[in-house]
Image (cartoon, rainbow, N blue to C red):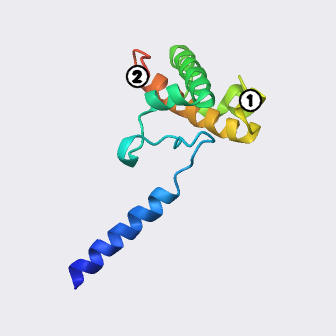
């Protein structure tokens, strides 16, 4: 009986997690790969224009900061605060674009600042 309850609890947890996955207009799950696993940043860059633009901008800002000896500060950049570089109305909501851009910027900045070669992904 106890094992059955554990299996049931795990199944309910999995069902609740998979139902919360954001889905794009074309039915593609955003940021989710096969079997529901989160995709690496490199795959997300290829899938989302806002994230890709943010990642590239964050990577460049981080490389500049690192080379200039400035402290780690992704949110201190105007690009991050504005968050709408490269926005097109065809992408949908400006606010959603900003959220994805900023997520990409933080990931790119982190990769660029912490990687001495600036390879990022």
Distance from disc 2 to disc 1, alpha carbons, whole Å, reads 34 Å
Residue at image location 44% in from the left, 22% down from the top: 120
Quadrant where the image shows the N terminus: bottom left
In the structure shown, which secondary structural element does the residue marked by tag 2 occupy?
loop
Residue for point 53% across, 30% down? 47
The residue under the point 60% across, 42% down is 24
Which numbered disc, 2 or 1, marks the residue closer to the eye? 1
Return the residue nearer the eye: 60 or 87. 87
Provide residue 34's location: percent of width, then percent of height.
37, 42
Q: Nearer the viewer, residue 10 or 112?
A: 10
Density class for disc 1 (Cα within 10 Å; few <14, some 14-19, many ≥20) is few
Let me know if residue 72 appears in the view: no
Secondary structure at badge 1 equals: helix
Image x and y of residue 45, in percent = 51, 27
Asked if residue 39 is positioned above or below residue 54 in the image, the reply reads below
Residue 64 sits above or below residue 40 on the image: above
Quarter containing the C terminus:
top left
Residue occupied by mark 1: 90
Q: Is residue 13 left or right of residue 22?
A: left
Q: Would residue 62 be visible to someone looking at this image?
A: yes
Compared with 36, 87 (above or below) is above
Residue 5 rendering spot, x and y as whole percentages: 29, 80
User: Which quadrant would residue 65 be assigned to in this image?
Assistant: top right
Residue highlighted by disc 2: 115
Q: Earlier in the sequence, mark 2 or mark 1?
A: 1
């Amino acid at each position: 009986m106890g094992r059955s309850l554990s299996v049931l609890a795990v199944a309910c947890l999995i069902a609740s997690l998979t139902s919360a996955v954001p889905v794009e207009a074309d039915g593609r799950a955003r940021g989710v790969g096969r079997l529901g696993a989160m995709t690496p940043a490199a795959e997300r860059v290829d899938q989302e224009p806002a994230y890709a633009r943010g990642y590239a901008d964050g990577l460049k800002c981080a490389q500049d900061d690192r080379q200039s000896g400035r402290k780690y500060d992704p949110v201190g950049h105007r690009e991050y605060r504005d968050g709408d570089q490269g926005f097109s109305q065809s992408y949908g909501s400006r606010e959603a674009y900003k959220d994805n851009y900023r997520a990409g910027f933080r990931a790119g900045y982190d990769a660029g600042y912490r990687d001495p070669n600036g390879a990022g992904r």
